[in-house]
Image (cartoon, coloured by chain):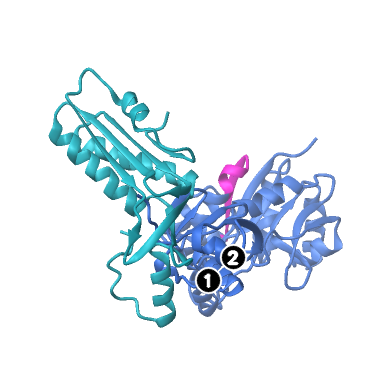
Chain colours: A cyan, B blue
Amino acid sequence: MSVFRFTAQPIEGAALRAELIDTHCGGFTCFEGWVRDHNEGQQVTHLEYEAFEALGVREGERIVAEACQLYGVSQALCVHRVGDLQLREIAVWVGVAAAHRDEAFKACRYIIDEVKHRVPIWKKEHYVSGDSGWVNCERCATHAQDHSHEDHDHHAHG
Amino acid sequence: MTAPLYGLILAGGRSTRMGQDKAALKYGQRSQLERAFALLTPMVARCFVSVRSDQQSEALRSKFPQIVDAPGIEGPSAGISSAMRSHPQAAWLVLACDLPFVDVATLQLLIARRDPARLATAFRSSHDGLPEPLCAIYEPPARDALDSRLDAGRNCPRKFLIQSDTLLLDQPRAEALDNVNTPKELDAALARLAQPSPAAPRALRVQYFALLREQAGRRDESITTSAATPRELFAELAARHSFTLAPEHLKVAVNAEFCEWSRPLNAGDQVVFIPPVAGG
């Protein structure tokens, strides 16, 4: 099984954690990204994730391999959800098992940060107001029409 | 039985209009003569360079196997005739060294379509439809016909092909046999070789995601386009679908791998423009 996957099914953390158990490892860290009910002042009702999976898996696998290389970790896994998600569901799951806690924390942090910036996944937020929008896209689109491209503090392209 | 195919690079021209030896003109690191010889050698049993008798010991020409023009004849026919006399059993693929756009595909096409039962196989000029004598295959029986014309003072190889049993082929590209005679044509050729040539229309597949999918109103489409690069393709699609994202906000992938906006596009490529991402 790939160390980076997409799934349209609810993410079951316990089953993923079991894949990483290794007698050489003394520590395990996990990050779960959850669907929350607000973003940038808007009340969110639910989310929609869409991925370019063929490239996303390749880029995700590269990120996990980089983390293992950088921090000397052997066991790491990342699973990202696609499709419609309700509040409280898990959007992304990262788990790292390592000999010691320090490299496990660092590798876990590296993976989630890079995934958010590099893997072709898009998030559409649906709001209480009935509006919806693609996160990071709508702002760019507006700016493109205004011909002012500064102030892209939330721009996801590293 | 089909005669073995030998190669002859014509490099004996006087280069009057160029004002310097055309064979020595450089395209990149190599001279025209070196380029032509390297191109043709792998495709033929033996390869020679045609020279006038006073050119034999020149530094550029002396390192190649030579066939020296028989005395008393002028022009390219002298080289072709001299080669056919020196190895009468062979057919000759004759190639002028001043054709910078001839490539492997051009020569492969000529060889693949060769008809040994005719006197010659040649391309049709893309300018006037007449045979191009200086990128052509001459079969052994062409020797007597060519020589009897030379004896009668007729030394134009094009007229020979027109009046002989010649198989004529269409060129793979209109500019494949354009030659270079003047400094101005040389500059134009160098500029053309430096640019990716405008692509012929071909079919590509484009997939859309997120905001671009919604604005295009579809997940994918096949498109026939002459856009040479993803940058040109995006401009074409943005006009068609009224995309609100500018290219500086996007990345691009071809065949499921990130690439530069200037990457050349090929038939069948799968192209995806990637809006700002938001995982996690």
Instruction: For mark 1, give the secondary structure.
Output: loop
Instruction: For mark 2, give the secondary structure.
Output: helix
For the residue pair B29 and B272, the one nearer the viewer reads as B272
Residue B3 pos. (x, y %): 75, 39
Q: Which amino acid does label 2 sit on?
A: Ala
Identify the residue under disc 2: B216
> Is residue B152 shown above or below B57?
below
Q: Do the residues under discs 1 and 2 have CB atoms within 8 angstroms?
A: yes
For the residue pair B117 and A20, the one nearer the viewer reads as A20
Q: Give the range drawn in magenta.
A: B40-52
The chain letter for the residue carrying disc 2 is B
- How far apart marks 1 and 2 lie (CA) works out to 8 Å
Q: Which amino acid does label 1 sit on?
A: Phe
Q: Is residue A1 left or right of residue A28?
A: right
Write down the quadrant of residue A32 in the picture. Answer: top left
Q: Can residue A95 be seen in this view?
A: yes
The chain letter for the residue carrying disc 1 is B
As drawn, the label of residue A134 is: none
Q: Is residue B20 left or right of residue B73?
A: left
Task: Indicate whether residue A101 is drawn in magenta.
Answer: no
Residue at x 27% of width, y 67% of height: A153
Residue B187 pos. (x, y %): 49, 75
Residue A136 pos. (x, y %): 38, 64
Identify the residue under disc 1: B243
Residue at x 81% of width, y 66% of height: B152
> Is residue A97 shown above or below B170?
above
Q: Is residue B63 visible?
A: no
Q: Are marks 1 and 2 on the same chain?
A: yes
The first of marks 1 and 2 along the sequence is: 2
